[in-house]
Image: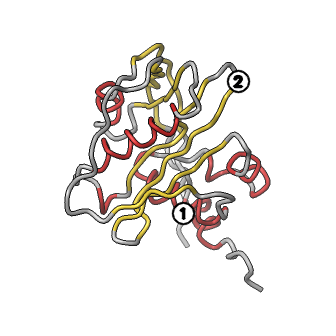
Amino acid sequence: MAKSTKPKSLKATVTHLQMTRRPRASTPLPVNLHATLIRATDIPLHFYRYLQWQVGQEWHWVDRLRLSDAQLAEIVHAKTTRIFVLSVDGAPAGFFELSDLEDSTVELSYFGLMDHVRRRGLGQWMLGQALSTAWSSTPARVIVSTNTLDHSAALPLYQKMGFEPVSQNGAIIRPLSDTEILTMVKAPSPGAD
């Protein structure tokens, strides 16, 4: 039996951005798409992990996938967290997550699309929806971070929508090992005996 090897850590440059004014214009939903964006209140943890994996596996979104149920529930079920799920033609297609922080700041914690709906013009529309939702609570600013392992369009899109870079730092990302992926996949479904 072959021994599982640990994936090599990856270096990334993280760019922190902020927006201090509500964007002026919103982007319309692309034509001929049947899309819905619904707030997921009290989101089931297994569904949240599914969204994280389907949207973020290519970009090495691993932090939330490593959390225990209790740790994850504390974050995603907090009153300060708002999660919205995008569906296209009735199937999950992406999500965004907002976190209300102290000092009148809203963080766009996660934002992304699943591969089957990319390149259809949904990214800019959904980001506009995320920003409209973030600004609905009249914060002093909205912040977001992206890194060099994210989709190459992420940073330019954030800047196009009105975010301005405020700082950068280096980071080391440790991808999920095969063992961690198998453990996640084999986790019992809620209500299973």
Which quadrant does the N terminus fall into? Answer: bottom right
Residue 41 in which image quadrant = bottom right
Query: Which residue matches tag 1?
Result: 50
- Looking at the rendered structure, the secondary structure element under dot 1 is helix
Image quadrant holding the C terminus, namely bottom right
The residue at the far top in this view is 166
Examine the image and state in which quarter residue 75 appears.
top right
Mark 2 to mark 1 CA distance (whole Å): 29 Å
Residue type at tag 2: Glu
Residue under label 2, please give it: 102
Describe residue 18's horizontal placement relative to residue 74 as left or right. left
**Residue 192 has which mark?**
none
Q: Nearer the viewer, residue 138 or 105?
A: 138
In the rendering, at what x and y percent does residue 63 appear? 61, 44
Say left or right for 172 vs 27: right
First in residue order: circle 2 vs circle 1: 1
The residue carrying pointer 1 sits among few (fewer than 14), some (14 to 19) or many (20 or more) residues within 10 Å by Cα, namely some
Between 53 and 45, the residue placed more toward the observer is: 45
Q: Amino acid at mark 1?
A: Tyr
Residue 160 on image: x %, y %: 29, 27
